[in-house]
Image (tube, grey):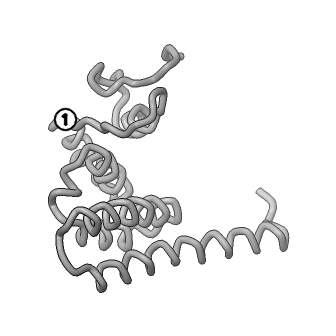
Amino acid sequence: MPAPDGGEMLRLWEWERLRDLYADAFDDLCHERRDDGESWTAATAALGREAIEALLAAGRTAEARSVWERLCPVIRARGRFRLIEARLLLAEERPRAARAVFEEGFEVADLREGAEAISELWSRLSDEPLPPFHDFRMRPET
C-alpha cells in the first residue's frame, strides 16, 4: 500500500481533529448538564452516540468507553445503545460479551429500514446466520 500523499495526510489530520471535537463537546455537555430532564437526556444521547461512533472509527476504544460510562443507565438500555455497546465490546476484543448483548435481545427502534449495521456486526461475531429477530436487511443473503 503506498504512503498517503500530502492531501490525504491533511484529510486524515482533519478527520482526527473532528473526532476530537465530538469528544470535547461531549465532555463540555457533561460538565454543563444540570439535571436529568428530557432536553438534557436527548442532547446527551445524541452527542454521546456521535462521540462513541467517531472514537471507535478512529480506533480510540478507551476514549469511547469513557463516553459510554458517562451515559446514564436509561440511555445505555436503549436498543441503539445496546448495539453500540456490542460494537464497543468487540472493539475491546471481548467478542463473547458482545455476543451476549445479542443473546439478551434488543430492538433498535430508530434503525433505518434496510440498514445492515446489525447484520454487519453479527457477521464479525459469528459464522452463524443472523437471528431472524435482528434481520432487517432488504436484500437476500449472498
Location of residue 9 by image quarter: bottom right
Quadrant in the picture for the N terminus = bottom right
- 126 or 115: nearer the eye? 115
Q: Is residue 134 above or below residue 63?
A: above
Q: Position of residue 4 (x, y in %)?
A: 79, 66
Badge 1 amino acid: Gly
Q: Position of residue 134 (x, y in %)?
A: 31, 27
Q: Position of residue 138 (x, y in %)?
A: 49, 20
- The residue depicted at 26 percent of the width and 43 percent of the height is 79
Callout 1: helix, strand or loop? loop
- 34 or 129: nearer the eye? 34
Q: Is residue 65 above or below residue 75?
A: below
- The residue depicted at 48 percent of the width and 27 percent of the height is 114
Which residue bears the numbered disc 1?
105
Mark 1: give few (<14), some (14-19) or many (20+) Cα within 10 Å. Answer: few
In the image, taking residue 129 as reference, residue 107 lies left or right, namely left
Quadrant in the picture for the C terminus = top right
- 111 or 4: nearer the eye? 111
- The residue depicted at 37 percent of the width and 35 percent of the height is 122
- 107 or 64: nearer the eye? 107
- The residue depicted at 29 percent of the width and 85 percent of the height is 31
Q: Position of residue 18 (x, y in %)?
A: 58, 72
Q: Is residue 20 above or below residue 98?
A: below
